Image (cartoon, rainbow, N blue to C red):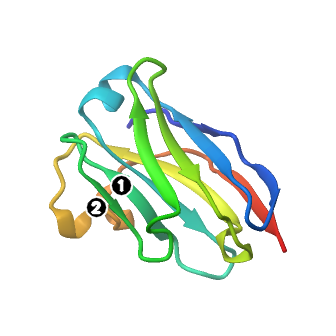
Amino acid sequence: QAQLLESGGGSVQAGGSLTLSCAAPANIIRAGSMAWFRQVPGKAREGVASIAVTGYTRYADSVQGRFTIAKDHGKNTLDLHMNNLNAEDSAIYLCAATTRRLDLGWVLTESAYDSWGPGAQVTVSS
C-alpha cells in the first residue's frame, strides 16, 4: 500500500473554489489509477473523480463540469480543482490509489482501491 496525504481542505462560501492535493509516491503518480472520494457522516463513501494511467478521467454526475482531477508529475501530487462549490459538496475528501489497471466500470468504486489517505475536510457555507 502506498502512503497518501491530502492537503488543501478548508472552509469556503458557496460559489467559491478550492483545490485539494494528494501527495503520493512518484511511482503511483506515474503508473497508478487514482481517484478522489468523499464521505459525509451517515452516508456511503462516494466516488467523485478518477484518473487512469492513460490520463482518462471520469466524474460523478454531481460534480461534472465543476471539478477537475489532474496529476502533477513535477510535484508528485493528485489534485482536485473544485469550482462553484455548494453546501452539498461539504464532506471529508479522500485520495485513493491502486497499481491495478481498472475497468471503467470500477473507477469510482471504493473497493477498487487499496491505498487511502486520511482525508481532508471541506466545508461549504451557504
Location of residue 78 in the rendering, given as x and y in whole percent from the top left corner = 46, 37
Inspect the image, locate mark 1, and give the three-letter code of the amino acid beneath it. Answer: Ser
- Image location of residue 66, percent across then percent down: 53, 63
Q: Is residue 93 left or right of residue 58?
A: right
Could you tell me which residue is drawn at 81 percent across and 57 percent down?
A: 12
Residue lying at the far bottom of the rendered structure: 42
Q: CA distance from mark 2 to mark 1?
A: 6 Å
Kindly identify the residue that appears in the image at 78 percent across and 65 percent down.
124
Query: Can you tell which quarter of the image residue 7 is in?
Result: top right
| Residue 46, image x, y percentages | 49, 71
Which residue position holds label 2? Answer: 107
Please identify the residue farthest to the top as the structure is shown: 74
- Amino acid at circle 2: Val
Q: Is residue 112 left or right of residue 47?
A: left
Label 1, residues with CA under 10 Å away: few <14, some 14-19, many ≥20: many
Instruction: Looking at the picture, tell me which residue is in the foreground, 50 or 68.
Output: 68
In the rendered view, tell whether residue 73 sits above or below residue 43.
above
Provide the secondary structure element on which disc 1 rests. Answer: strand
Instruction: Report the residue at 43% width, 48% height from top.
Output: 69
Residue tagged 1? 50
Seen in the picture, residue 12 relative to 52 is either above or below; the reply is below
In-front residue for pair 65/21: 65
Q: Under tag 2, what secondary structure?
A: loop
Residue for point 35% across, 30% down: 29
Residues at discs 2 and 1 in contact (Cβ within 8 Å): yes
Q: Is residue 53 above or below residue 74?
A: below
